[in-house]
Every structure is written in structure tokens, then in C-alpha cells.
Image (cartoon, rainbow, N blue to C red):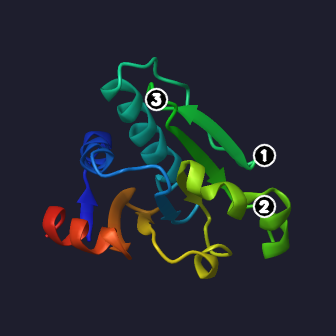
Amino acid sequence: MIDLKDLNETKKIARKFIKFLEQGDIVLLQGDLGSGKTTFSRFLINQLQSKNKLPMSEITSPTFNIVNYYDVKKNNLQVAHYDFYRIKKFKELENIGFLDQIQNFVSIIEWPNLIKKAIDQYLVISFFLNSKTDERKIKFKGTGKWCQILKNEFK
């Protein structure tokens, strides 16, 4: 588990991940409300855009839209930023075409509990917030390619 002392620390961690992200990758963000999931998403997406000399988008939580799309590379690589907070049944994910589309994007998913059983390769980033002290921590777990990346980059 890593202590997040400030927003710069969160930004540094997001920057470490951008070099590994490819179309079809799935990043699952877990944590309580206000723990830093959307902030981390903003840093990750904006750093991908900056690296690829694209204008930085305003990144907001897709709670009501369910998904927001962002261009992050000039060759049409996009990030699909999902928020499944309001999704209660797996069938709802099927209805929005989530499983049909996932291979076309880098998918960042907040509140991913329903989807974990339907995918086999993903990176889980868990955010922890002590509301009394406002201290934040972050923890990583991965399957597939992420196992080796986490072992090498986040010892």
C-alpha cells in the first residue's frame, strides 16, 4: 500500500501507468465516495493527452452518463471512463453494449463490482480514505500483463 501525501503523488502514480496502457486494457477503480477515483482518472487521461500532444479535456465523473469518451492519441486511441455506481444488474451492462465495446478502448471503470466476473485481465486500483485525517492510500492488484508490471514498477 502506498501513502498518497498530496495530489502530486497521485499524479506521479498515474504517470507511471500511462506507458503501459494499450487498447483493450481495463483499469478498475475501487474506493469510497471522495477517495480519489475520479481525480486519478483525470490525471491518467490528461497525461495521456499531454504525452500525445492533444488538448487536455475536462474530466468529470460519468455518474449520470455512465460513460464519457476521451481521445488520448492521434491514431484514434480512446479512453472510455465508466462509472457503474448506478448500475445494479449485470444485464444493464449488457444493454449498454459494454462487453461488445470493451476491446475498442482503454477502459477505466469506477464502481466495478458487477463486471469483475466477466473479464479476466485487468488492473485493480483501490483507494482508501481516512475521513478523520483526510489521509489517502492506494493499493494495486492485477491479472495478466499487470502482474509483471506491478512487480517491476511498484515493488
Q: Residue at x 35, y 25 (%)?
A: 52
Dividing the picture into quarters, in which one does residue 84 lie? bottom right
Q: Residue at x 46, y 72 (%)?
A: 121
What residue type is disc 3 on? Answer: Asn
Within-10-Å neighbours for mark 3: few <14, some 14–19, many 20+: few
Q: Position of residue 113 (x, y in %)?
A: 63, 75
Cα distance between the residues tagged 3 and 1? 29 Å
Which residue in the structure is indicated by mark 2?
A: 86
- The answer to whether the residue labelled 2 contacts the one labelled 1, judged by CB atoms less than 8 Å apart, is yes
Q: Which residue is mark 3?
A: 75
Q: Earlier in the sequence, mark 2 or mark 1?
A: 1
Q: Secondary structure at mark 1?
A: loop
* Camera-side residue of 74 and 33: 74
Res 73 quadrant in image: top left
Residue at 78% from the left image edge and 61% from the top image edge: 86
Identity of the residue drawn at 46% across and 22% down:
56
- The residue that disc 1 covers is 64
Mark sitting earlier along the chain (3/1): 1
Q: How many marks?
A: 3
Observer-nearest of 10 and 52: 52
Label 3: state its secondary structure.
loop
Residue 60 in the image: state x and y as whole percent. 61, 36
Closer to the eye: label 3 or 1: 3
Coordinates of residue 95 in the picture (x, y in percent): 86, 62
Quarter of the rendering occupied by the C terminus: bottom left
